Amino acid sequence: MGERIYTAGLVVIGDEILSGRTHDKNIAQVASWLQVQGIRLAEVRVVPDVIERIVEAVNALRSANDYLFTTGGIGPTHDDITVDAVAAALGVEVVIHPDARAILERYYADKGGLNEGRLRMARVPEGAELIPNRMSGAPGIKIGNVHLMAGVPHITAGMLDALTGTLEGGARLLSETVGGFIPESEVAVLLREVEKAHDNCQIGSYPFFREGRVGSNFVIRSTDADALQSCMHTLCEGLGELGFDFTPGGI
């Protein structure tokens, strides 16, 4: 494809994710939101609440991609260290953002006021801008190509909504799905040949086991609508020639 492909990395931060205590939902929603912006999620790293590990992941993914997002670790407690880690990665100081402080003062005015813990949520790497948060007052943070967001999924969703349309991206990634009770091993050659014949498309195979039977859904992705439809037609035609029943849209 001649059009430039924009990519993003995501660092998911928190011991609670790695322990299995909390089930992450942000990867899927960030990935879906990015696709609408014309940006592809290229890599995800899940790291513990350890500054050195966060710094390593942030520096690796921010330099390898157009954008970097982090989720988690920007709350009011001592183990919310994402701001400190990102500041260290960028080589800047941590400061209290005056606008963030004002936002928090208003939000907590009838909730006991702004205490030391709540004030931590006004801390940002020096030079940062704020990402609005309509849900809980505490804003997200943007500095360079790095975007720090909450770990709570519905708060993250609000921050993503605030960023909608503000990032430069490429063409939106489109997809079509076809599936059936088709063992992927029996159509591996077909999938490879169809993908090879359509340079602008990628085919993913996702097997499942239902009703005592093996099946697969095949997802075709492309930024070119015409190429996508051509690839979909060729794949369906090939499945039919091999004698398989299939369902457009997947099963």
Image (cartoon, grey):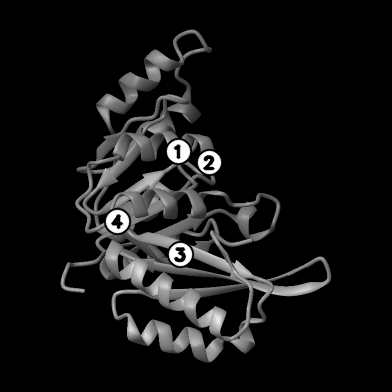
- Closer to the chain start, of discs 4 and 2, is 2
Seen from the viewer's position, the closer of residues 96 and 108 is 108
- Closer to the chain start, of discs 4 and 3, is 3
- Left or right of 62: which side holds 76? right
Q: Regarding mark 4 in the picture, which secondary structure is present there?
A: loop
Image marks 4 and 2: residues in contact by CB distance under 8 Å? no
Residue 139, percent across and down? 37, 32
- Left or right of 233: which side holds 162? left
In this picture, is 41 found above or below 71?
A: below
Residue 198, percent across and down? 32, 80
- Closer to the chain start, of discs 1 and 4, is 1
Does residue 60 appear in the picture of this structure? no
Seen from the viewer's position, the closer of residues 140 and 116 is 140
Residue 121, percent across and down? 42, 33
Residue position for label 3: 44
Residue position for label 1: 157
